[in-house]
Structures are given as structure tokens and as C-alpha cells.
Amino acid sequence: MAEAGRAEAGGLPDKITIEMTVNGRPVAMEADPWEALSYTLRTRLGLTGTKISCDVQACGACTVLVDGLPRSSCTYLAYEARGKDVLTVEGMETADGSLSPVQQAFIDQSGFQCGFCTPGMLLATHALLTSGDADDDDAVIEHMSGNLCRCTGYVPIVAAVLQARKAAAASRG
Amino acid sequence: MPHFTHPFRIAQPTSLAEAGRLLLDADGGAAVYAGGSELLLAMKQGGLRYETLVDIKTIPGLDAVTAVGDLVSIGALATHRSIARSAAVRAAFPLLANLEGVIANPRVRATGTLGGNLCFAEPHSDPATLLLAHDAILHIAGPLGDRTLPIAGFTVGSYSTALEPGEILRSIDVPRLGANSLVAYQRVQQLEHRPMLGVAVRLDLDDARRVIVGSRVAVGAAAPQPTRSETAEGLLLGDVAGIEARIAEAAAALADAADLLDDADGSAEYKRHLIGVHVRRLVTGVLAGNAPQIGLPRKRRPLEAMIGEWQHGRERTPPADFKIIGRSLPRTDGHPKVTGTAVYTADISLPQMAHAKVLRSPVGHARILSIDIEAAKAVPGVIDVITGQDLLTLRRHLFGHAYRDNTILAMDKVVYAGEAVVAVVAEDAATAQRAAELVEIAYDELEPVMTPEQALREGAPLIHEEPHEIGHAPGHINLEGRAPGTNRLTNDIVQWGDIDAAFAKAKTIVEGEYYYPMSFVYTMEPYASIADYRGGEVTIHTTGQHTYTTRRDIADIFGLPLSRVLVSTPYVGGGFGSKSYSKVEPLAAVCSWKVGRPVKVELTVEETVLTTRALDARVWLRTGVDENGKLIARQARALMNAGAFSQNAMLVSAKTSTRLVGPYNWEAVDIQVRSAYTNTSPGSSYRGFGGVHGSLPGEVQMDETAEILGVDPVEYRLQNLVDRDHEFWPGKRPLHADVKANLRQVAGGIKWGSEEPPNTGKGVSLIVMDSGAVPIGRSEVRLHGDGSVTVLTGAAELGQGSRTVLAMVAAEEFGVGLDKVRISMSDSRVAPYARSTGADRTTIMEGSTILLACQDIKQQMRDMAAEIWDAPAADMTATNDGVQRGQLFMPWSEVIERYFTIQDMEVSGRGHIRPKNSEWALIPPSWENPIVGARVEADPETGEWWVKSLIDIADIGLALNPTLADGMDTGSLMQSLGIAMREELIYDGQQLSNGSILGYRVPEMADLPDEIHTFVIENRDGMGPYGSKAHGDGSMSVVAPAIANALYDALGVRLHRAPFTPERVWKAMKDRDAGVNPNPTTGIPDWWTATEWTERHARKPSGKGH
Ligand code: FES
Ligand code: FES
């Protein structure tokens, strides 16, 4: 854990080009190598649905999916998302503009109060349902425990996850 | 801050050799960047800084996991997730796969790598400990060639490995186990996902499985590095039969070998004890084939069953006399909140907006000698650097609703570590932060006072040398407790009857000392504010719960009229009292005033803790019982740590004194609470204002008293509780609740009296609280010509659902669907004054004003209809749909159109409440009577415990929206569980040692009990709309004592200090076994009498405070 050492930047670029897909749309921009994806999304792209709380990958408020896997966008570099697919809460609605089954489940079960944890919870649920683990209750609890909520006491969130799990099972047939 | 403060660049080598060269060339200025989950975290937290990250993910082939011959080779870049899912690992090392599947959280597992984890050598990590038991071999590439190293020699200390400069871990080989090798691993976690201890055991048996021929034992997470003990391993060898006799010695040897730390996770002594327990459980378990499995700490009920029961428990028949009210209509803010379009303060961006960052004091108490801002000012992108001296031209440079003692920026001295001293305004937040680090401040340190005991000692250094101005809104707060010339802030007294006489006749007297910790509310949304001061007026966007109090604070700072201060509170990410009154709004406002541009201030969670925390209480409590077993006397003395600024500590102190009373029929009460300024982060309100500070002593002592009398604790409460409509508190509103019936219901809910399995127990706890609100408010309602409705109210939407519930009142009154009602945000530009959003006031008080405004409109409509029909107004009746006159009926829209001759017209109504000359005069407006029943299961060896059931009462008169109503209680139950389990802010000297979400962990989903239920009691006996009562704090105030009582039932230990960490439970068991009396007879303790001298300095002689 040394103090900042001196280093030759070795001619490395100050700016990097980031091309990625965000919510199904390709975007390209010049960005800083040290830029957290949350900054790119919130500040450069105006996608403020992604929330920042702990800022140290512990609370899950900033959860987004990159190539389908959940990431803490507060401590995940935009650099890492080059060439990848990023999904934020703004991209969850289905193509016809209706709410996704996960979003609908959170409304039906009143799975939020202040709503600050909600974008992260929705994406964590989405990731859970595609992980193949969702049928195992312990895995559900383990997975969702990575996202904190201070308002709901989690019970309605569990109810929403179970509703979404059923919907996903039904659509698989 | 969602940006890294210090720039770095990223190198993309294509080979390990190139990567190694880059590292060597950078000479310490570069780091290997693998998954980055730990590296970036450490860089973000500020401790670690590199100019270059060498991204080895650009080197092909380093992430493979392959089974080769008698080992499995794991590439250094394989993520935890991929290892957990790897077929090769699952087949050969299921335990390792399971462990990798529970590291940190799914986001970290998707990104972080096993190689990175080993190389980072963070001491609180599991995999290295388990890999020690596996004799893993590490392959290392380096400038002088490749080498291999057994894992035992790899981690050499905390964050320190045997890697030489330029060396990079390539892969980890894990040798396959023989058929007779058994491995087990136990992680002990107090902060979920971050072990405080990990123990790994491997036993190699002979073919007959009778003799242990080889062994490995290792311990990690409790010491600077994971440690094996060859002595312990040797002791385990030999015959399986009789191994029990050798285990304790082996465990002791393992504990000896590890350099066990006394730290925030626990004492070395407790860790040594746990090593003994877990080595035994693992060795005997693995031999018996039932070793503990890695995963959740306990078996849960199936989720479908739990949720099904919970849902079933909340079904109820909607009241027939309403169309809207009493229905669980979906929240009106649902769509914006699930689509990411709900706007919170931090989401707002204004044209030309600049960003401010703050440099905070590193010391607790010091004079500021000099501040050098030149270097910061010179940073490109910096607009201005502001210090306290710049504020001297303002009308006021201090704020505070009760006392104006809160600095915006420190003036000539700092009074706590974390106080804002300098603000840097720049084009972006990262630049502001970097520049702030360049400000040089010279301090002359003064003696700090960190506790109320220190602060109220005669001769203690004064924190505030000058007495402060009284603020603009002291409200109904008792200001007499402040003793100028001392650090005393409050002195709250509740007294009636003759306490000495009561104790003189008492047959049984029970005494004890109790402690409720300092805590942090942690709303997910940290404090943020944007101010725009231009053209003689200032507009503020804020996360605050007190829109209109903040308006007044800002007006006072600048000498502006209220009409030129426009405060708007968009959606708020949770409040729970922590966002009451002004926090960062004054800072944003002075920054904008200084630079002439809009300025955003967005605090981190760490800065939020340093802005406001919640108070602790040390309480001595004595109860007197007469010869018939009847409670007669209650006496208490309490000290609270108010911190450096008063904020709302005065109300918390006052409420603690009233909430220590307890809803029993006392002949005499003598309660006194003092709080003191200290050099700590300012203390303020938290859900329930002192409720649990009062109930933890009160309700634990109720159980202790019942036990001494040999009476069942529930029965004992029932014998002594106050009856409905009884004026148990002289001069206050009679109790409008049947607390006895409610207690019976909760007791039934946890099957009180039924047998429990061993080490499982039940407890109850209750309180009656005077809801904290001042009954002042007003609303305006507009009924439009098309029948739709606009409601203007100053209540903020903190998540409690005010926008939904208040809209339902108007919808009910005008017979329309919720989609026809639009409700304002809390915005002084459009909405009328609201005193606050807190203290459970909104539904009953703002709701009442809305109801009155609707009635005002209906009155006008009757008059208008009377004119249209040319008939006396007395013949008109306003229904909920229109005006009725005998058989004739005219809907609202027709009344408006015919009266005004145009359909787009509207009628507006107003309503207000005030405490004078009204039914609101009697205090309190509502009594709340939360009751909780808890069932817990405990581990009698380790002191760990889990909640099985949490049942509570919401006696709320009428649930206007049942789902939202019991949602408040579910949230409150789980929130308060945190402080029963593990939440406690800890000062280490002058510094807060755990003021971040990594160190201060709140409940998570895994902490959910198997059963949770709220009985909603609806007797329509409240002052609010349709008979509703104050609601929102829920059972926050009684969870901790219910759990303490249940732990007594389970283990026979009295817990007087929250949180009830496993270590404290374990210590209590040792005390119990040693015969220590938890209730020694001390009389009024010395720590209290040592503060009596402050009375001589009190503003006025303190009288009966309430
Ligand atoms: S803000 Fe990223 S995990 Fe908390
Ligand atoms: S709804 Fe407020 S934090 Fe989850």
C-alpha cells in the first residue's frame, strides 16, 4: 500500500475511446481512463436512474448489467465496458414500452418506498433470473443480499423477486 | 464521488513479460490491474494511488480453469464467479467452488479474480485460508524467469505477498485430494460477506479411515495473514478414535500460531474461543460426514411459504364506507421509481452548474492558525476557494433552528474531526476534490472532549466558548437545559409524585445500567443540495425533510425575505429523521453566492456520517414495586452525546426523557436526561426520537422485575399497563389505545407460553410515545372544472408514500380515481408551508389540512349550487360526487361550469391546523404504542443468534392504504434489527473508526427472519383523517429490548448494551456462569452526580420540563 509512486506515463493516452452498447443503442465517446462507469452513465449520457450511495461496491445502488452480469458501476471502469452491452434501469422496459415483468413485480408487491435502491434491485433481480440459480432459495437470498435497502425491510422485495421468478418460469413454459 | 479523484492511465500489455517490464519501469507507480474489484476500491477510498494500471486482461489465456492430471489449474484471471461455476472445480473441490460462490457479492464475483484476491492479500479474505489446507501451488512469472511458490509462503502479511517487483501471478494449481482426504471450512461473519474468522481443516485418513495420517489446519481473517500451524496439524495425527481429546490442544496451538488481532471485529480472546469451537466442529463434523456447509449461516424456511404467509396475513376487507380510503392502491410514484425517471437531488443538473468539495478538519478540537489556499486556487478548473472568513460579510454565518451553533465553514476553531473548513468550487467534483487536498491548514490543537462524561466534568475544556443565539424555530423545545459556561446542552426532567416516598414503601427495587449506542441512519441517498443564488434570490434543491425550515435558515443567512428563498425537495432517498432541518443547503448557498453560479454539493456516505449521526444514551434506571407486586416508582438518569452542534439533539434528549416513562401506572416518576456538546460528529434525530433509548432500559428492566417477582413477563405487563382513556400522564391527552389488548395480540402472534426448542427464546417489549409533531400545517386544494384535483402540500415524499396517501384523501372527498389527482412536491415555490416531514405527522396533520381544504371547497360548491338553483344554501348537501338538493343532483363539473360559465375554471379551498384554540391543543396529538414480539435462536457456544420471528402492532386508527401502512412497519422492524445485531458507530480517539458502509453494516436480506408480521389495529380513534393516528416510526423503538428479552429466554443472559454482538452475548454467558449480578444496587451513579455542578450555570433554574 505504498504512497503514490512516480511513474512515467509511458506515452499512454490521456483519453480513451469508448464504444459500447447502452440499453440497446450504440454509443461512442472520448472518456477518461480513470472514469467509473457510473460517471459515464449519469454525467455523460444523462442516465441518472443509476444511483450512487456507498460508492464502494457494497450497497448495490449503482448496479448495472454488463454483458448480462451485475457490476458495481461505482467502482467499475467505463474502460471495461468497451465493446460490451450495458443495461441500466432506463433500458428495462420491453420493446413495446410496457414494464418488464421484474419492474411490474416491484410495483405489484410495493417493493420500494423511497426508490433509491430500486434501480439496483431491479437489475440484481434481472441478473438473478438469468443466472440459472433463481430456483434455489438460498441462492436468491445470497444474491439479493448484495443490494441494500433501508426502507422496505426486504420482505416486499422478496415477494417481488418470487413474482418475477414465477413469471420467468411461466414464460419459459 | 462517482469519479476517481486522481487520474491514472491504463497500459495494455500483450504478454506477461511486457507487463512485468511496465511494472519495473514504473518503479512503484504502476499496479497490476486484473479484475480490479479490490484495487479500484482501495484507490477510490484514497489510500492507494497509482499513475498507471497495467491491465493484464489483455494477455490471452490467463483466465482458464483446467483439470490437468492430478491437479486443477486456475488461471490468475479466472473470476470468482467462473471458478464457482467451473465444472472442473465443482467436481474436484466442491467446497472451494461454494466458497467462491459466496465471496463478497455477485457484482464483485463477476469482476474480481482469485489471483487478484491472493495478490492483494486483504486480511479479511477467505480463499487463501482454504487454499492453505489444499497445499495450493502458485505459478509466478517474473523478470528473472518463472518460479513456483507454495501458498504457505506467499502471503507474508497484511496486504503483503512474496511477489518481487515485476513479478505477476500466472496461475494457481490445486492438487486433487485422495479419496480419503476430507476438507471442511467455516467462515464466521458478523458483517455479512466479510468474514471475521475463517477456519479450514483437512484430514487425510488411511484406507481403513481409522487413522489420521496427514492434516492441515489454517485460520484466516482474524490476523494479518492466514496462518497454518504445524504443531496443531501434528496434534491431530493418530487414531480417529479418541481424537476429541486432542482437538482442544490442536485448536489452542492454531490460535497461538496466528497473530490474532483485537479489532473492530472482536477481541483476540473471543477469536481464540471461536477457533476452539470451530476446529472442534469441523474435525468432528468432517469425520462424521456432516461438516458445516459454506453458505448462509442457517437453514431458512422456504421463501414461498414465508411470503405466502406474510401476504395472507395482510389481507383485509376494505371498509365499506369509503371508495378509495382503506384500499391498497398502488403507489402513485411507482412508474417513475421503477423506470429510473424519478428525479432525486443528485440527478439535477443546471446550466453553468459548478461543483463544491469540502476539506474537513482532521482533528477534533483545535484553533485554526492559518489557511493557505493559494495552491488550490491555482489548479486549472477551480473557480473559487472559500473559507469561514469569507462568510463574515453575511448577515449570519451560523445556522440552527434551536441554537445557531452550526458552522457552514469553520471560523476560528474546529470542534470535531470532519467539520467542514474550506470549500473548493470547481468545474467538476474531481477537480474540486483534488484542489481541496492542496489546501494547507495549520492547527493549534486543544484538549478534545469525546464523551458526555468528559464534557460535563468540572473544568472540562469548553467546546463553544460563546453562548449561541437561539434559533428561529425552537418549536416546543425546552431551552432551559443549556448551561452557558459549560458543555451542557440539555437537562430534561419528567417528575410527578413523591419519588422518595414511593421508593421508601417499595418492597422490591430493581436497578441497572443500560447503553444504547451511537448510530448512523444511513439513508441510501447521501445529503446533497444545489443552490442557485442570482438576481437577489436563491433557489435550493435539497434532500432535506424540512423544506420550509431550510427556507428560513437560508433567509436568515443572507437577510433575504422568505419570498425570495425558493426551496424545493424532489424525491428523497429515505429520511428517517436524519435529513431533518438544514444540513448542506447553507454550504451550497454560500458557494453559489460567492461564485455567482449554481453550485452542487454532493456528499459521500462517509461525509454524511460526519454531518449527522444519531445519539447514544447511557441510562441508569430504577424501578420500585409495592408489596402487592404493583409498579409504583420509576427513576432514571441518562447522559447523551450530542456532538459538536446541537442540530436536533435537544428534541432527542427531551423525547428520551418522556420515553423513559413507560405506559404503566406510576405513583411517582423522576427522570432526568442531560446531553452534552462533545468533539464528535453532531447528533440528531433518528426514527423514534429516543424511543429505543428509553425502551431498552425500561423494557429489559420490566422483564428483570417480573423475574424477581416470579411473574410471567407478559402477565406482569398486563397487570400494570395503563387502561384506555386513562390520563396516565398528568395533564396530557388520555391514552387513546388499548395497549393491553394489543399486547395480548402480539403475545398470541409469537405463541407466548408455548414450548421452544433449546437455545430458542421469546421476548416482548412495548412503549407508548408522544408523537413528536407540532400540530401546525396548511394545504390548498383545487377542484378543476373537469372534476380533477390538484393538491398543494409542503409534505416531502421520503418514501413513506405521502404523495399516494394524501392524494387518496382528496380522491375520496371528490369521488375521483387517483389518476385524476395531482399532488405537488414539497416546493416552497408552489406549495404552502409545512412544518416538516417527520415525526409521523404527515398523514394525520397534512392529511387533516387537506380534508379541511376539501370541505372548504364543498362549502363553496354548496353556495354556488344554491345560486344556480336559486335556492337556500341550507337545502344543499355536498356528497363526494357533487351537490344534492332533494332529488336533484349536480356533479362538480356542472356546478363549476354553470357558475363560472366556463368549464376550465376551478374552485380552490384551504385548510390549516394550529395548536391554539383547537382540538389540536391537547398534547400529544397522537400516542403511538408500538409492541414487538421476537423469537430468536442462539448458538450457546459462540453467542451468535438469528431472529426467527418478528411480530408487531401498528395501532393506527385506520390504515388509509394498508399496504403502505404495514410496509412502514416491516421496514421499521428490519431497520431497527440492525442496531440490535451489529450497528454501532465507534470513536477511536478523535476519529470515527467505522464511518463507511464497509465498516458500518446495516441489515441485508440474509438477516430476514423466517416470519414477519404486523397486526394493523383499526379503531378509528385518532385525530387524523377518518380517525387515523400517527404512524411511520413503526416499531423501531421496541425491537432491541424485545430481542434482549428473547435472548434471556434462550440463553439466560441479560444484555444491557446494544448491539448484542455475538461477542457480547458470549461475554454475558461467561458473566452468568461466574455469577455476576447484572443488576447491582448502586444508587444514582457517580457519572451522573459528577455532572450536578452544571446546575449552577443553567440558564434558568430547571423546573419541571414538561
Ligand atoms: S454505490 Fe456502487 S455499490 Fe454502492
Ligand atoms: S426503497 Fe428506500 S432504500 Fe430501498
Image (tube, rainbow, N blue to C red):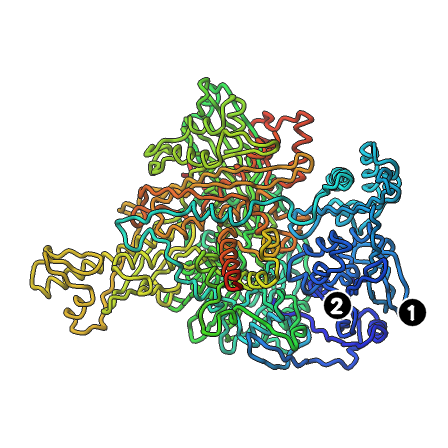
Seen from the viewer's position, the closer of residues B620 and B557 is: B620
Q: Give the quarter of the figure containing the N terminus of chain A.
A: bottom right
Relative depth, front residue between B1076 and B812: B812
B52 versus B266 height, above or below:
below
Tag 2 subunit: B
Q: Which residue is the site of mark 1? A: B145
Residue B448 in view here: no
Residue B668: image quadrant is top left
Q: Can residue B364 be seen in this view?
A: yes
Ligand 1 quarter of the rendering: bottom right
Secondary structure beneath dot 1 equals: loop
Q: Where is residue A9 in the image (x, y as percent from the top left)?
A: 77, 78
Amino acid marked by disc 1? Gly
Please count the marks in the image: 2
Q: Which mark is residue B34?
A: 2
| Residue B525: assigned label | none
Q: Tell which circle, 1 or 2, labels the residue nearer the N-terminal end.
A: 2
Residue sitting farthest toward the right = B144
Q: How crowded is mark 2: few (under 14 residues within 10 Å), some or many (20 or more)?
A: many
Find residue B238 and report its image quarter.
top right
Rate crowding at label 1 as few (under 14), some (14 to 19) or many (20 or more) other CA atoms within 10 Å.
few
In this picture, residue B939 sits left or right of residue B224: left
Name the element at disc 2. Answer: loop
What chain does mark 1 sit on? B
Rendered view: B347 above or below B1103: below
In this rendered view, identify the residue nearer to me: A144 or B559.
Answer: A144
Q: How far apart are marks 1 and 2 (CA)?
A: 21 Å
The amino acid pointed to by label 2 is Ala
> Where in the figure is residue B123, as x and y percent of width and height?
76, 53
User: Quick check: B568 left or right of B133?
Assistant: left
Task: Please report contact status of discs 1 and 2: CB closer than 8 Å, yes or no.
Answer: no
- Is A82 drawn above or below residue B194 in the view shown? below
